[in-house]
Amino acid sequence: MPTAPWMVHNGAIVRYEDCRLHAFAGVVKYGCAVFEGLRAYWNERQAQLRVFRMAEHLERLAFGARVLRLEGGPEPAELERGVLAMLRANALRETCHIRLIVYLDGDGELAARGPVGWVAGAVPRGSSRFVAEGMRMKVVSWARITDAAMPARVKATGNYLNNRAAELEALGDGYDGAILLDARGEVSEASGACLMLVREGRLVTPAVTSDILESITRATLVELARSELGLEVVERPVDRSELYAAREILACGSGWEVVPVISVDRLPVGDGRPGPITRALQEAYFATVRGERPERMGWLTPVYPG
Ligand code: PMP
């Protein structure tokens, strides 16, 4: 599905075709930008579109811009206004994926800190088939970027050459998705999602020191697992062979949502079908994002009045 016709560029609502920047902009020359992928969920019964955990996404974006030393960029409130205006301009009444990018503009050299531009657009997109069917994953030969070389917890555009290489390898080898180990050989994350394993009835997830992106969906599931499912959640280093020992595995991210992992390196996870804890977490997650949990409405920003 293509990007919706109206985008927001440096605060102005513009047509997709008119959303342009110079080919020598810093983001093109050096891959210097930070971005977010957010989702807005349409609730048909309530006739409302709501952005999930917008404040947390804007906070991570601001953190990333600070680490990349981007100066003079937009304030979170300006980004929030712009994204909501863009969604309204498209009159979207369906679930969509929003791409928000804060980038190095201008024609400066490598250490330029500005000028900074920003852009956002939305792609109408429901859940992938993997949410229902599960995904067959491969531990790829590429290691996850190490925080000693690139800021792994920053959602920086340039970092994604690593994720792309991983995904190309997995898809090229006939799998649905990639799992990356960190430079120490421990499990890090998937190409666009974090990982959680079920071991002895507990939820285990690689710690934030395993070169993961500090995922908002991961934090959401940790909270829902503890409060709604009464599960114990452990954040710690995870060995590769634990992927083969786990009863269940899931991948989670704003775009991916909650995806059961049904095999790793062709070894079935559990009995090779999505497991009960994964299904329960999916149920809790989708109810939450659709605005069906009154106690979690603080995580949702309505797009339309009323
Ligand atoms: N890891 C990577 C590499 C990602 O690209 C994403 C998607 N943003 C995630 C994890 C999940 O992060 P979030 O839940 O904040 O979307």
Image (cartoon, grey):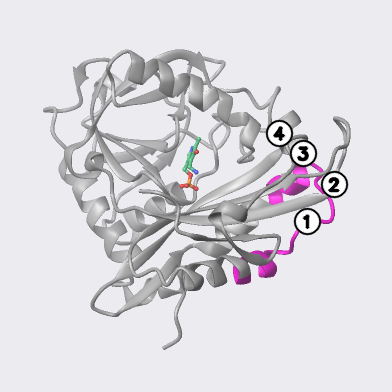
Q: Which residue is drawn at the image coordinates 30% and 53% (left, top)?
A: 126
Q: Quadrant of the C terminus?
A: bottom left
Q: Which mark is residue 25?
A: 3
Give the residue type at disc 1. Answer: Gly
- Is 205 colored magenta in this rendering? no
| Mark positioned earlier in the residue sequence (1 or 3) | 3
When the figure is inspected, residue 296 is found, relative to residue 183, above or below; the finding is below
Q: Residues within 10 Å of mark 3 (few under 14, many from 20)?
A: many
Give the residue type at disc 4. Answer: Val
Numbered marks: total = 4
Q: Are marks 2 and 1 in contact (CB under 8 Å)?
A: yes
Q: Which residues are magenta?
A: 63-81
Q: Which residue is drawn at the image coordinates 61% and 38% (left, top)?
A: 153
Q: Nearer the viewer, mark 2 or mark 3?
A: 3
Q: Which mark is residue 28?
A: 4
- Give coordinates of residue 60: x percent, y percent: 62, 52
Alpha carbon separation for disc pair 1 and 3 = 15 Å
Nearer to us in this view, 243 or 260: 260
Query: In this view, which residue lies farthest toward the bottom?
Result: 306
| Helix, strand or loop status at disc 2 | loop
Judged left or right of residue 267, residue 141 is: right
Residue hosting label 2: 114
